[in-house]
Image (cartoon, helix red, strand yellow):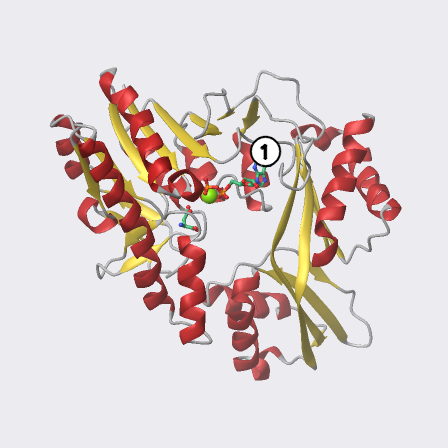
Amino acid sequence: MLIVKKFGGSSVANVERIYNVAKRCIEDYKRGDNVVVVLSAMGKTTDGLIELANSVSKRPNRREMDMLLTTGEQVSVALMAMAMQELNVPAISLNAFQIGIHTTQVHTNSRIKEIDKARIRHELENRKIVIVAGFQGIDKYDDLTTLGRGGSDTTAVALAAALHADKCEIFTDVEGVYTADPRIVPDASKLKEISYDEMLEMATLGAKVLHNRSVELAKKYSVPLVVRSSLNMEEGTEVKEETRMEKMLVSGVAADKNTARISLIGLKDVPGVAFKVFNCLAKKNVNIDMILQSIGREGSKDITFTVPRDMLEDALEVLEENRDTLCFDRVSSKKSVAKVSVIGSGMATNPGVAAKMFEALFNAGINIKMISTSEIRVTVLIEEEETELAVRAIHEAFRLKDL
Ligand code: ADP
Ligand code: ASP
Ligand code: MG
């Protein structure tokens, strides 16, 4: 059996935890399995490196940012290999360049295109535990790239898909996927299983327990995925195509603070305006999320949309650069907003979900700034400082009585 096991930052935060992970992997190895381990940087290393970069430069060059951030994972894989060797098990650490994890060129947010399998296969054939630096890749110039915050999950799933692994286990600091972030809602319940589609929405909408791209890949390549704790042996949550359970009305509440709002005021009310706005943002790799366009009045209209907060400066810059072509009166933006969403595949056929969510927000005195919906989710934009209150209120509303 080939198993890919991924351990996040808190699971390898110190020497004791590194040994705990080493021993857990060795158990599988001694059972005869082939083991590939993917690691994140130790503890809050990545946050520390970003802070360091920001203290050197106001807007750090993204290529250099990747050069810096990839060092974090390199530290943990080397230490893990040493720990396993200390326990008399042959292990080897590899980075993205040594393996050949090829990505797009979008620094700090690249996507994996292809993974070379030869080196890993060779090491596994020699009965070594292969320890891979997560989160990183190389582009067509062999420059280091990173996959976006939380991207080690994606490294693990991509490797599991490429190597046709029998199992991909994501070990983290909670026991699985919960109905809401257990740090915000202490009585949230652990889900035994969740469908790829629901998990993808949860991850995309801010449940950082899994990187959204990892779920996308798991679905595309049918990778059997489990999220569980690195600190105990509890069963965890299975992420799979179809769950045995009846379609749940609401499977979870998610919040995302990495959000900012931009409004373009006084655009011309003619065809092609939205195309021009979003086309120039797309060229700069700015992801757009919620979009609201006002109806035209006296020949002009407004467009409001959200972008990831860390892309706000880039987005404003490209809009200013194209001011003459886009012809707007003014642009306004706000950083301190957050998205809160309810997700559930059962809501497609149940019209009461949005109303129930809005009622919960109303009762909590929270004002909604924007709304967007899909078949399996409802998302609202609110003030950032009200995020936790909103998550708790919505979670409580859906837990107390079913529709
Ligand atoms: P790792 O370093 O292991 O990758 P992360 O911090 O990236 O860990 O992800 C785990 C965290 O995700 C948890 O500590 C928890 O606070 C948060 N989280 C957010 N939403 C959820 C959810 N629905 N279920 C479980 N954890 C969640
Ligand atoms: N170390 C990276 C981060 O903190 C990647 C990861 O943890 O998955 O975002
Ligand atoms: Mg993570």
Q: Nearer the viewer, residue 25 or 394?
A: 25
- Outermost residue toward the bottom in this view: 324
Up-down: is 357 above or below 312?
A: above
Q: Quadrant of residue 120?
A: top left
Which residue is more in the foreground, 7 or 100?
A: 7
Left or right: 119, with 392 as reference point: left
The residue depicted at 56 percent of the width and 31 percent of the height is 177
Does residue 30 sit above or below 6 in this rendering?
Answer: above
Name the kind of residue labelled 1 in the image: Glu
Query: Which of the two residues, 75 or 1, is positioned nearer the viewer here?
Result: 75
State the image quarter where residue 289 is shown.
bottom right
Does 149 sit left or right of 41 as displayed?
right
Residue 138, horizontal then vertical, whole percent:
26, 54
Q: Nearer the viewer, residue 174 or 210?
A: 174
In the image, what residue occupies the spot 18% across and 27% down?
89
Q: Is residue 104 shown to the viewer in this render?
A: no
Q: Quadrant of the N terminus?
A: top left
Give the labeled residue for mark 1. 198
**Residue labelled 1 has its Cβ within 8 Å of some atom of ligand 1:** no
Can you tell which quarter of the image residue 62 is in? bottom left
The residue at 78%/69% (across/down) is 296
Image point 39% across, 61% down: which residue?
49
Q: Mark 1: give few (<14), some (14-19) or many (20+) Cα within 10 Å.
A: many
- Left or right: residue 287 versus residue 6 is right
Task: State whether residue 400 appears in this view.
Answer: yes
Q: Position of residue 15 (x, y in %)?
A: 33, 40
Q: Is residue 284 above or below residue 163?
A: below
Question: Could you tell me residue 185's position as x and y percent?
Answer: 69, 37
Q: How many marks?
A: 1
Q: Secondary structure at mark 1?
A: helix
Image quadrant for the C terminus?
top right
Image location (x, y in percent) of residue 272: 61, 68
